[in-house]
Image (cartoon, helix red, strand yellow):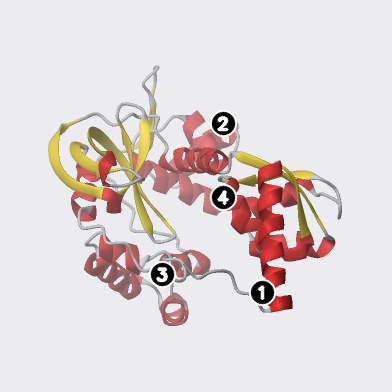
Amino acid sequence: MKASRLLSVLLLLQSRGRMTAQVLADELEVSVRTVYRDVEALSAAGVPVYADRGPAGGYQLLDGYRTRLTGLTTEEAESLFLAGLPGPAAELGLGTVVAAAQLKLMAALPPELRSRASRIRERFHLDTPSWFRGQEQSPHLAVIAESVWNQRRLHLRYQRWGGQALVVERTVEPLGLVVKAGVWYLVAGAPEPRTYRVSRVLELAEGDAFERPEDFDLAEFWTAWSDRFERTLYGTRVRVRMTKAGLDRSQYRLTGFQARFIRSLEPAPGEEFDFPTESLRHAYGDLLGLGAEVEVVSPVELREQMIQTISAMHSVYEGGKLPPWE
């Protein structure tokens, strides 16, 4: 355990440069006192690590010192071949780069790790798009990725959700790209961070350079934004009650957010609860699929719509009377 931690300290200093004891402690999830002891152990082993005093100080390696030791474990080597993301990498124009990097890594691995990594690549494949939906065309993705990397503003013509009439023009500071279920999203400040679906970018032009906020965390932002988006999207509530079978079916018949919401409430069969939906129109489609296992209590207009539909269906199947086709 200590040897692994010492290697982590060494690789962190090599990859990031000067780091304070507190930052190292936070990164490794240990105490600052443990970091002090680890640095002393590295120095005793001949690693040229030294400390700068003062507010801007910290530990760093002697200029030019590099270790060729990677310390890859079997699991770490295997995980690198699972993280190749061949589809998204190809969309970014990096497909050949990823393949070349994996080839070099394969050649550098010792034989016992090489064989396992090779089996990983042969037996596992990541396909990011969801079922029954083709890959979205994002012709501007490579340019956007270049702007993210080079920290250059983008002037966008963007089609917002809702049709051609909602085309807007924005100048944004690209902070990161996220691929979600095969769909690419740009996270950009304008000035506050917002998300843009890359496939809806109609035209773009690169602008001048900007300073990226040092405290911006892409993964943290995306997690918080996704949670807000789902809660906003499913902002309408209708009062329902379900049978036990209906509660069970809701876990695979409804959307992931709706299923998680119902699980969090833990309603008993027959107990009324507020069901989250995008709108009454969406609730009609969602709940009709549960058949007689759900009852809409309110609002009245949705309840009446369900009754009318069920009555019309009864006429079709019981009396053979189809509604007018027009």
Q: Secondary structure at mark 3?
A: helix
Give the spatial CA distance, label 3 vs label 1. Answer: 56 Å
Please name the amino acid that badge 1 sits on.
Val
Q: Secondary structure at mark 2?
A: helix
Earlier along the polypeptide chain: callout 4 or callout 2? 2
Q: Which circle marks residue 316 in the picture?
A: 1
Task: Say above or below: 49 vs 261.
Answer: above
Query: Which residue corresponds to mark 3?
Result: 81
Give the spatial CA distance, label 4 vs label 3. Answer: 45 Å
What residue appears at the point 62 percent right and 51 percent down from the top-left corner? 283
Earlier along the polypeptide chain: callout 2 or callout 3? 2
Task: Say above or below: 321 vs 38.
Answer: below
Earlier along the polypeptide chain: callout 4 or callout 1? 4
Give the spatial CA distance, label 2 vs label 3. Answer: 34 Å
What residue appears at the point 36 percent right and 45 percent down from the top-left corner? 161
Query: Which image quadrant is residue 317 in?
Result: bottom right
Q: Secondary structure at mark 4?
A: helix
Query: Which residue corresponds to mark 2?
Result: 32
Give the spatial CA distance, label 4 vs label 2. Answer: 57 Å
Give the spatial CA distance, label 1 vs label 2. Answer: 74 Å
Please name the amino acid that badge 4 sits on.
Arg
In front here: 167 or 303? 303
